[in-house]
Amino acid sequence: VSRALDLAERAVKAAEGDEADVSVHVESSGFARFAASAVHQPTLIRDETVTLRVVRDGRIGCATTNRTDDDGLAAAARHAAEAADSAPVDPSFPGLQEPARVPDVGGYDEATAALTPEDQAESAAEAISGAPGFGLYGYYTSGVTEIAVASTTGLAVSQSATDTSVLTLAASVDSSGYAEATSWRAGDLDPAAVAREAAEKANRTRGATPIEPQTFRAVLEPYAISELLFYFAFTSLNALALLEGRSYLSGRLGEKLFDESFTVVDDGLDPVNYPKAFDMEGVPKQRVSMIEQGVARNVVWDRRTAKQAGDGHVSTGHALAPPAQAFGPIPFNLSMAGGDAASVDELVERVGDGIYVTRLHYLGVVDPREGIITGMTRDGTFRIEDGRVTTPVVNLRFTTSFPELAAGLLGLTKDVTLVNRSDFYDERYPFGTLVPAVATDAFTVVGTGSGPGL
Amino acid sequence: VQDLTEKAIDAAVAAGAGYADSRVVRRRAQHVATKNGEVDSVSDAETEGIGVRVLVDGAWGFAGDPRLSEEGARDAALRAVAFARASASRARSRVHLAAIPPATGEYAAPVERDPVEVPLEEKIALCLRAEEGMRRPEVKITEATVRAMREERLFRSSEGASVTQRFVECGGGIDALAVSDDGRVQNRSYPSAHGGSSGQTGWEFVEELGLDREAPRVGEEAAALLTADACPSGVTTIVVDAEQMVLQVHESVGHPTELDRVYGTEAAYAGTSFLKPDDLGGLRYGSEHMHVTADPTTALGLGTFGWDDEGSPARRQPVVEGGVLTGYLASRETSALIGRDLGGSMRADSWSRMPLVRMTNLHLEPGAGSLEDLLADVDDGLYLCTNKSWSIDDKRLNFQFGTQVAWEIKKGKLGKMLRDPTYMGVTPEFWGRLDAVAGTEEWTMYGLTNCGKGQPGQHAHVSHGTSPARFRAVQVGVRQ
């Protein structure tokens, strides 16, 4: 029995209610964060968090604690009971998940789990050695997480997972380039190669000049399209947003909304991504086909939204832990199908004249119902002229419709890349987005900003 | 528990740390959310642990452990030393800390009614009552939230600092989402978007917010936005309400004046700053009407403390005076780099995170006159209220912000409501267009709990006091 599952089952026993479920998150991680080619914020974290939900006479209460001795679990049980007793009956509560078989999805690597702080510092040093002409900024991190869910229904599931990421920004006063890599196997990552990619990109950004704002034909690297896709998915491929009319897909399911090359699934079972066996209610993950050849087909569901919708909907295994369920179900294993382009260069040829975007910064959803997102480009923005990437451009302010971008796809690379999407706030929950590079005829730039560099 | 902070320091120093500090944090936080007349969630969260930060041969190391025991304290200390030592062997330079007198003493937030002890039934009832007030046929979703937090933080350093601080926070907010028959969506919030507003004090703060009092207006305005005209594009005069000014100050003054960003340590994630160290005292940030102050002593502020998370005492400090940059938000390390005593702004979001340079309470100082006085001097313009969307570039220069609502200003008076307003600018140019800030009678402080920074990420709780402000010749309506 894993540490997490043992804790979950102890917490279920401590619960004071008619029914209860418990999710447990155990983390051990190291973060070698560097700036100006030196490690400056090295952080080691150990923690274990127990979230207990009790049902008492149809009333629901939750409590969370990291005090995992008997006294701590008893206090959490008491707090959850008090919360439940304070609440009115919850008519929307869908009940607890029944015991279910969860798939063995992998995602755990012994060698990654065994990495020490010295190993993490060494990997950061390898990255730094890969960009000798620049200051290198970013991090190397690895961690082990265990997640378990248990309940009074007899549910008892757990999963151990590993993750590693290296993120690099090679920069000088007047140049900056970006690259990153992520995997649940540390052996898949070459920190020095990632830093070399960032440095090579930075080398080409000196002398950036402004460009007249307009709607461009554009190539977006995986780093850029993954962020746009996740923001769109968070606000639109989410059953709660769909039911509340806030999603771009509200009232549009079944319609062809995007280019037929645009296909998006959420697949927790895919070992190329960060595989996940179940959600935070213990529901086994399902592969959900959301956009099929440009047609809006589905979103992801949890037990509460499935009950709210009726019509035979069931949870697809995308619930957050109970206190966070106000966000609705979230697709943490997004995958966008690749296309027919052999390389990014081929996408550039298809664009002909336009812009090339490496990475985005500080996105904001201007209008979730219409899928309009704003942000800046950074660390590698270039002109595309006559089918070739040419001169560097300053950072650009874009305010663009994601649906129009996806309706105007000119091509996608065959190869797809896993891009880390976790910023490691709160409990560690690694996840990524598997995407190709894309070319589109609709990327709207509304302003220009500063040049690349520090 | 105080003993544990000492044992951690002792273990770190014995293992080779030239400097060590330790923080024990115990927190309990409650959150109540209701939605469409039902309880959406009632949660009660506890977390505790010890964080140990060390310098070994001039290189940092940090480790956090949830066990408040001798074993946990010692393990955290030894792991922090090991990580620092592994980094130190490759370091190109040593970290130096500006000297400060070792802090000793206690701080406690002023509380009349402990918000954690307020019965959950009372919190739920308040939320449901406020929600009820927002209901309209067009309003499909009503939401209300309240929060309460109590935290004890003990800090000790190898230099002899030893402080105990007790923080108490609470707050709340309401939101109405209106949806038209043809699928258009608009929302209004009070007292601000993004979880409402919080203060560092007792439950009396939440009672004074008047969530149920404001609810009918919030519901009415959300419904009215469905049929409002879209905000036009153009260059015009804008008057920005105090709530949106909070975000304007936060994003375009607060973050760029964090000295760690100026020195590049946030370059890979949150970004850097358009400011440079030698801009201090000379750079023109905005017009003569612009006065910004960092003040961790402000009553009720979420950034109020006795000492920051490396033992620097709270001190009010100007950041921009008469439009000129005169201060930075700093740490002991960055103060040593710039060679100036800039006070302490180091804060960590929990025991498991290393302190970072963060905003405390950063205020736009009031000018003179009322909101009506600001409007009176506008022949044709817009009054923009309540943040809706935000984005700013990595140097904190180019920004685009959206608000939930705007009203036309015609010949000094508010006119019709407009939906989907946005405005954009470049930080020093934009602040250079500031030609009036309303006075003390309009000055309001908002407390935010969602300021993100750092890798691994941290949420800071910060407050900003602002008055409505007027800017000339601003690009509005830039939405595609």
Image (spheres, rainbow, N blue to C red):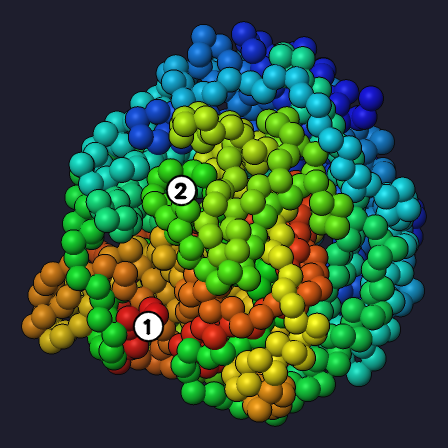
| Residue B346 position within the rendered picture, expressed as x and y whole percent measured from the top left | 61, 56
Q: Position of B158 compared to B473: left or right?
A: right
Residue for point 79% across, 48% down: A184
Give the residue type at disc 1. Val
Q: Which of marks 2 and 1 is in front?
A: 2
- Residue A247 visible at all: no
Do discs 2 and 1 belong to a common subunit? Answer: no
Task: Look at 33% across and 49% down and name the residue there.
Answer: B192
> As displayed, is residue B393 above or below residue A419?
below
- Three-letter code, disc 2: Leu
Q: Mark 2 points at which residue?
A: A242
Does any portion of residue A437 appear in the rendered image? Answer: yes
* Nearest to the observer: residue A344 or residue B133: A344
| The N terminus of chain A, quarter of image | top right
How far separated are the C-alphas under marks 2 and 1?
A: 27 Å
The number of discs equals 2
Crowding around mark 2 (Cα neighbors within 10 Å: few <14, some 14 to 19, many 20+) is many
Q: Which residue is drawn at 52% across and 46% down?
A: A290
> Considering only vertical position in the picture, is A413 above or below B178?
below
- Residue A303 got which mark? none
Picture coordinates of residue B86, whole percent (x, y): 90, 58
* Dot 1: chain letter: B
Q: On the image, which quarter does residue B413 sit in?
A: bottom left
Residue A167 image position (x, y, % from top left): 72, 63
Name the one closer to the observer, B309 or A340: A340
Q: Which quarter shows the C terminus of chain A?
A: bottom right
Q: Position of residue B141 (x, y in %)?
A: 30, 37
Q: Find residue A133 and report its image quarter.
A: bottom right
Q: Provide the chain ID for the residue under circle 2.
A: A
Q: In this view, does B111 lie above or below A200?
A: above
Secondary structure of residue under mark 2: helix
Q: Name the residue under label 1.
A: B478
